[in-house]
Image (spheres, rainbow, N blue to C red):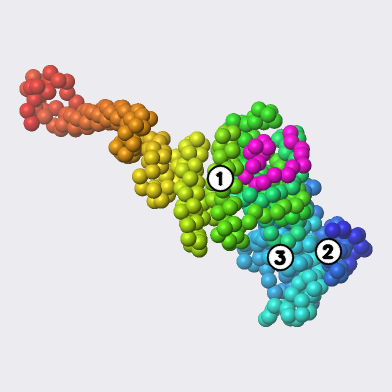
Amino acid sequence: MAFQPLPYCGFRYVDLIELRGFSFNGSFSNIKHVKCGVLQGSSLGPLLFSIFYQGTGTELPMTGDKVFVHYVGTLLDGTPFDSSRERGEKFSFELGKGQVIKAWDLGVATMKVGEISQLICKPEYAYGTAGSPPKIPPNATLVFQVELFEFRGEDITEGEDGGIIRRIITKGAGYSKPNEGAAVEVCVEGSCEGKVFDQRELKFELGDGKSLGLPSGVEKALTAMEQGEESLFIIKPKYGYGNIGSSKYSIPGGATLQYKLKLTTFEKAKESWEMNSAEKLEQSVIIKEKGTQYFKEGKHRQASVQYKRIVSWLENESSLPEGEDQKAKALRLAAHLNLAMCFIKLQEPSSAFDNCDKALELDESNEKALFRRGEALFAMKEFDRARADFQRVTQLYPNNKAAKSQVALCQKQIKEQHEKDKRLYANMFQKFAERDAKVRDGERRWDGCRGEWRTGVMTTGERCQTVS
């Protein structure tokens, strides 16, 4: 979007407002005019744009950024119709997302923080032939005085924890985005503290990124992008290389990363609703083998992604032909068992526990499900429940020596916990006894040795001769 300088347009504003301590009372003659021009943003014609107070810095807001502004809107004759200043509350919106009129998406994108600008908006850039009754008539040209206070990148994490912030450099095409398992082609440029450490063109399936040395935040970022989009992502350690860092790239622990990504093209993985029953079964077998290969290579996170796909495809499948339902059940059981093992390896025992429960719903006496649930409970320090699961395994499968060993370990932990509790309660009762003694000693008592009433803490020898 190019800015074309023009002579001063001579527009006079007739309402009284105050911006940054300046009083506007009929003209802008008391403000140094910086520039006036035309924004050629579309085929609709020019958008008149004047800057009356220049902002600071060089950075401009990008598409998708959340911007915070104050504004005063008037008709061309000076009749006011809206003002955030009168409400005393800044207005915010996501730039370039169509949440405001076109004039704002175009004009605010050229502003710096602290800038005060005037936008003269033809109807095509505002409310068009319909207007916005009752205050804005049809085909109205509008005038906005806008001040930009701040802008922030878009938080794309599910919980909006600030872990992955996106700044869109070039907007993509369409609305479709890659899903888990999608085949993507992407240009990657990773940097840390201004130094580029990774620059590649990659083709891979989402879920396989870790095997290529990509942090989880990059794959999460790609699922938010459109085809052709180029964006800059700020990735916090939680979604980067964590507190350990990366020896391969010489990234220290706790480092914040910057990734510039360009999603050249992608092909979405088939969703469950896009496949018939036969296709789901066929793909589940293929995906199971792929997950098993990842697991053997020690890539437990990637393996878990594959097994989750099997569960999502088959868990609610009710239209299987006769004889195929048992095959689907076996695949689901294997997926849950393998997920449990992956989560144990990943030290996520609660997720392992949940998958064991799911497996036991399919086969209530399954040896692996009972044993792995016991392992998950042991990791969660629920030793009594863990012992019960391991004992159940030894009852059903007497030759399972590992379960017998785990029962002994659970008993040892339970005994140690009881001893610890015993010491804790003993100390607690001792403290209570000492406190009660001090309370008694604080009462007014007769000191037989001294022949007087005394108040306060007494020695053991003194206490033996006192009466209440």
Mark 2 and mark 3 in contact (Cβ < 8 Å)? no
Q: Amino acid at mark 2?
A: Gly
Mark 1 and mark 3 in contact (Cβ < 8 Å)? no
Q: CA distance from mark 3 to mark 1?
A: 43 Å
Q: Please name the residue shown 58% across and 61% down the image.
A: 276
Q: Earlier in the sequence, mark 3 or mark 2?
A: 2
Q: Who is closer to the viewer here, 229 or 48?
A: 229
Q: Is residue 62 above or below residue 16?
A: above
Q: Earlier in the sequence, mark 3 or mark 1?
A: 3
Crowding around mark 3 (Cα neighbors within 10 Å: few <14, some 14 to 19, many 20+) is few
Which residue has dot 2 on it? 41
Residue lying farthest to the front in this orientation: 323
Q: Earlier in the sequence, mark 1 or mark 2?
A: 2
Q: Is residue 260 above or below residue 52?
A: above
Task: Please say whether residue 272 is visible from this viewpoint.
Answer: no
Q: Position of residue 329 (x, y in %)?
A: 46, 52
Q: Position of residue 458 (x, y in %)?
A: 17, 23
Question: What is the magenta range?
Answer: 197-215
- 87 horizontally vs 125: left or right: left
Which residue has dot 3 on it? 98
Using the rendered view, name the quadrant where residue 99 is placed.
bottom right
Q: Please name the residue shown 92% across and 62% down the image.
A: 6
Q: Please name the residue shown 46% across and 54% down the image.
A: 326
Q: Position of residue 186 (x, y in %)?
A: 74, 46
Crowding around mark 1 (Cα neighbors within 10 Å: few <14, some 14 to 19, many 20+) is many
Q: Can residue 212 be found in the magenta stretch?
A: yes
Which residue has dot 1 on it? 288
Helix, strand or loop under label 2: loop
Q: Position of residue 179 (x, y in %)?
A: 64, 53
Q: CA distance from mark 3 to mark 2?
A: 14 Å
